[in-house]
């Protein structure tokens, strides 16, 4: 008996390395098959294909199906114990659905009409196969990307590269014949793709007349991916569908989404996606209720219009399917609720996901408190003083002040100028809308080139500050702006500590905020200087406005974007990329980090003032 066990142990040690190699080869083939499937679908729907090409694509899809079946079958047969631990319940469900595709292969189509024949036809249907394979492909590629984190690759660099890859993919998709009416240059395609992924809204061409329905679908998908963040989506799919990942992966993703602990990491990712879909869905219904029956569209066009603008507004993208953006005559009269809904979506998308999660905790606390009262008829008079965390308080207060000051300032300077001829309600609605857009949506209802210099200066400061951290907005963020102002107040008052709401701000927060402001000014100066040389016909204010709008991912423009040369467009696209990824994040990915030393130099004083 002992000899038999020794033989099995020896056999396992001898075979196991070959099993690992075989599974590694299958993993590589699965990644390749996933990419080929996506490329095939893009080619099929992006070009007008012949019957022979359609037949070749069908053979490609069949090959991908075989690869997925082989990969999952080998994993279950050769490493069932490890597979059972790594696969989540949803992964097992997808595996079961994949095995159901074998039913039409094993059994002939039932001759008697009925439910069994309908099920057989469904399982043999092309849509079922492609939808299942596409989902498995995305999950495998997401899991592969998250596994890169386990190799101790710089997470900041991965984040930047992931955005770059999506931008390049979007560039190719927008150049497909079915995406545009009459074609588009690669520079303009790259510019629009960057603007969509970086949720900016700057456009070098007239979007409404350039892109087809397919092009708009691609743009809105790029906006959604860019708004949520590539790593947020891939991490969610990998952890939610593909099972457990390494501890290092979870630590990196936790820092990216500002989760409080590893235990709440998956729930935080679910909340981010849940809040996004819920708010965008509510915004879509609200927009549709206002435009229904007023714009000459059928019900499907109205819903598509509402969904596009709800996603574009919440992601702070600023793209519109209408000629003239939101200043189209169809909207400018009798649609004040529409502009208010868009403004609220911009604000909700720009305050940051951590604050939305904090709102959820506050609402649940009051619901539990009220439910306890209904059960016991005894009201809990105790107050919880820390429902609103410090980050939430600062962001909400600064956001409120910026909106109030911006609305009042724009109304003051444009009351009898750009808003002339409007009713009082329209003027205040437009003032509020135009104060919300620079933070950082980029929609426009009036010609910005016709605004007064004072209003443009208000726009510049609002664009530069932007929205909240961990949000779809850009700018230096209201968090950093508030910290810099509080630090300035502390210096002027002669105090060593920066205190607010009974809390002392950490040294790291102050240091990073100051670095963000300095880097923002430095990058802006360099790009404004270069573009002013490349575009001598544009005024300095116009170039400055364009650059601030790009780096803050706003999308507002003084009608200068289509006039830029190819070199200037590429520089503005680079600014949008830098602004979306984040100055600090990008520098952390490029500059080699210095290890903390255990020694300390003697302190020295620099003469200031």
Image (cartoon, helix red, strand yellow):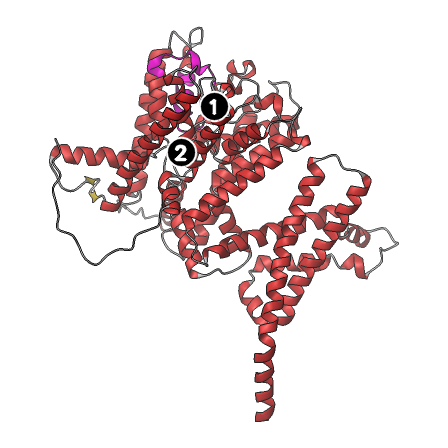
Question: Residue 23, percent across and down?
Answer: 61, 66
Name the residue that disc number 2 marks: 474
Question: Residue 36, percent across and down?
Answer: 66, 49
What secondary structure is marked by label 1? loop
Quadrant, the C terminus: top left
Question: Residue 587, percent across and down?
Answer: 36, 43
What's drawn in magenta, residue-wise? 428-455
Q: Nearer the viewer, residue 550 or 605?
A: 605
What secondary structure is marked by label 2? loop
Q: Nearer the viewer, residue 9 or 90?
A: 9
**Quick one: label 1, few (<14), some, or many (20+) residues within 10 Å?**
many
Query: Which disc number belongs to residue 443?
Result: 1
Question: Residue 248, percent across and down?
Answer: 42, 59
Instruction: Please state which of the two labelled residues, at mark 2 or mark 1, is closer to the viewer.
Output: 2
Give the mark, 2 or 1, whose residue is nearer the N terminus.
1
Q: Quadrant of residue 438?
A: top left
* Residue at image coords 57%, 60%: 89
Q: Quadrant of residue 216?
A: top right
Q: Nearer the viewer, residue 128 or 275?
A: 128
Residue 79 visible in the snapshot: no
Check residue 551 for magenta coloring: no
Q: Is residue 338 left or right of residue 392?
A: right
């Amino acid at each position: 008996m002992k000899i038999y066990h020794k033989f099995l142990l020896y056999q396992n040690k001898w075979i196991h390395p070959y099993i690992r190699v075989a599974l590694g080869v299958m993993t590589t083939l699965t990644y390749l098959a996933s990419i080929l499937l996506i490329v095939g679908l893009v080619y099929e729907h992006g070009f007008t294909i012949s019957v022979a090409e359609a037949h070749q694509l069908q053979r490609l899809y069949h090959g991908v199906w075989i690869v997925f079946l082989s990969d999952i079958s080998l994993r279950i047969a050769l490493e069932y114990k490890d597979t059972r631990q790594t696969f989540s319940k949803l992964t097992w469900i997808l595996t079961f659905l994949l095995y159901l595709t074998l039913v039409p292969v094993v059994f002939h189509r039932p001759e008697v009409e009925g439910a069994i024949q309908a099920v057989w036809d469904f399982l043999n249907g092309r849509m079922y196969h492609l939808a299942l394979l596409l989902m498995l492909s995305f999950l495998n590629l997401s899991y592969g990307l998250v596994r890169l984190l386990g190799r101790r690759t710089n997470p900041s660099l991965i984040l930047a590269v992931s955005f770059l890859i999506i931008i390049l993919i979007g560039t190719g998709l927008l150049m497909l014949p079915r995406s545009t009416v009459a074609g588009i240059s690669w520079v303009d395609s790259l510019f629009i793709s960057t603007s969509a992924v970086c949720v900016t809204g700057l456009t070098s061409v007239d979007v409404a007349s350039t892109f087809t329905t397919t092009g708009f679908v691609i743009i809105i998908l790029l906006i959604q991916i860019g708004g949520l963040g590539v790593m947020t989506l891939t991490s969610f799919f990998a952890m939610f569908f593909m099972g457990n990942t390494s501890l290092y992966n979870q630590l990196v993703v936790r820092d990216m989404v500002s989760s409080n602990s590893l235990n709440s990491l998956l729930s935080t990712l679910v909340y981010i996606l849940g809040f996004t879909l819920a708010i965008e869905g509510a915004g879509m219904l609200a927009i549709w209720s206002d435009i229904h029956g007023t714009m000459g569209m059928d019900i499907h066009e109205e819903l598509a219009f509402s969904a596009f603008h709800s996603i574009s507004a919440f992601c702070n993208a600023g793209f519109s399917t209408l000629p003239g953006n939101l200043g189209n005559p169809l909207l400018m009269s009798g649609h004040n609720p529409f502009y208010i809904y868009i403004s609220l979506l911009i604000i909700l998308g720009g305050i940051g996901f951590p604050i939305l999660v904090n709102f959820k905790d506050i609402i649940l606390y009051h619901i539990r408190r009220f439910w306890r009262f209904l059960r016991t008829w005894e009201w809990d008079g105790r107050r919880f003083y820390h429902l609103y965390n410090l980050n939430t308080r600062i962001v909400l207060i600064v956001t409120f002040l910026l909106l109030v000051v911006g609305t009042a300032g724009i109304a003051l300077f444009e009351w009898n100028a750009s808003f002339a001829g409007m009713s009082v309600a329209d003027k205040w609605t437009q003032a509020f809308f135009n104060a919300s857009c620079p933070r950082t949506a980029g929609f426009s209802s009036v010609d910005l080139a016709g605004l007064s210099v004072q209003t443009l200066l208000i726009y510049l400061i609002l664009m530069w500050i932007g929205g909240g951290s961990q949000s779809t907005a850009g700018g230096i963020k209201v968090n950093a702006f508030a910290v810099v102002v509080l630090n300035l107040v502390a210096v002027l008052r002669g105090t060593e500590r920066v205190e607010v709401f009974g809390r002392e701000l950490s040294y790291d927060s102050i240091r990073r905020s100051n670095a963000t402001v300095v880097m923002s000014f430095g990058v802006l100066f360099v790009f404004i200087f270069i573009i002013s040389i490349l575009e001598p016909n544009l005024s300095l204010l116009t170039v400055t406005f364009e650059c601030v709008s790009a780096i803050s991912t706003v999308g507002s423009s003084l009608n200068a974007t289509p006039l830029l040369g190819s070199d200037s467009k590429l520089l503005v696209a680079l600014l949008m990329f830098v602004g979306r990824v984040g100055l600090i994040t990008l520098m952390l990915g490029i500059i080699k980090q210095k290890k903390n030393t255990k020694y300390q130099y003697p302190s020295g004083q620099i003469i200031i003032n």
